Image (cartoon, rainbow, N blue to C red):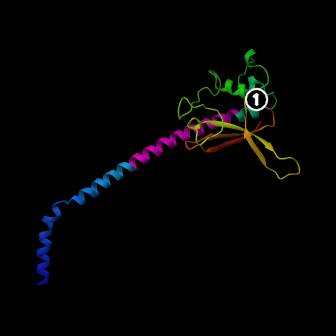
Amino acid sequence: MADKTCMQEVSASPQAVAFWRPRDWGFLTALGLALLAVVWCGRFSFNEGVLLEVTKSNGEAVAAWAAQLADRKGTPLTLATCASITGESPALQGEADWGSCRQALLAEGGPLAQLSNPFGPQNPVVGPRCDKKNPNARGVVMLEKGTSSLPGMPAHVTWELLSDEDALVRGMLLRVQACDAGGYALKIAEIKL
């Protein structure tokens, strides 16, 4: 007898299930919004990843230039060799300091002229330190010079920003880093000229 009453209740419930209650619609709405949020976050993360990869490839291009400069052991480091120009021109004669070398590298016709900052055209390609509070530092490639410890001291290298007045000389340690979207430095390479 108890089984008959259960059967009658079960047979009555399909009509009740066919009607959706407001909380069912609320759940489906919340589920749909959650799926949209996941898609939006995934798209945002993918775009940020693409910008970071372009920044890293800019850093790798600068590191490749520095490695190419380091491979030219027999030639003096003049502005013409810095800019990877085979022929000496009057405008590119003299000692290679980083400021004039950077301008020659990024000038039209220079070996790094095709590089652009993926985070915005107003941001420089090669520039100063990474700064979490400065949005113009996003996507910047920076070079630092290394100073080895004195003889008799524990071996380590101290890094400081390569300034425009610093001359590029043989034996100089260079570290190439790129700034990500959060203002953190990503190590690309270390090269000894």
**Does 130 appear above or below 13?**
above
Q: Which residues are magenta?
A: 38-65
Residue at coordinates 79% horizontally, 28% vertically from top-left?
A: 77
Q: Residue at x 13, y 83 (%)?
A: 2
User: Residue 113's spot in the image, x, y percent?
Assistant: 61, 26
Q: Quadrant of residue 96?
A: top right
Picture residue at 15% right of the left edge, 72% below the top = 10
Residue 105: quadrant of the picture: top right
What x and y, as percent, mark residue 42? 43, 47
104 relative to 138, above or below = above
Residue 158, image x, y percentages: 77, 45
Q: Residue furthest bottom?
A: 1
Residue identifier under label 1: 165
- What is the chief secondary structure element of the magenta stretch? helix
At mark 1, the secondary structure is: loop
Question: Nearest the camera: 147 or 136?
Answer: 136
Q: Residue furthest front?
A: 133
* Side (left or right) of 40 relative to 87: left
Measured as percent of width and height from the top left, residue 118 is found at: 54, 34
Residue 153 lies in the magenta stretch: no
Residue at point 77%, 19% (across, down): 93
- Side of 119 relative to 109 (left or right): left
Q: Looking at this view, is 57 or 116 the one in front? A: 116
Q: Amino acid at mark 1?
A: Glu
Q: Which image quadrant: the C terminus?
A: top right
In this image, 31 relative to 88: left or right? Answer: left
Q: Residue furthest top?
A: 90
Q: In this picture, is 114 found above or below 41?
A: above
- Residue 41 counted in the magenta span: yes
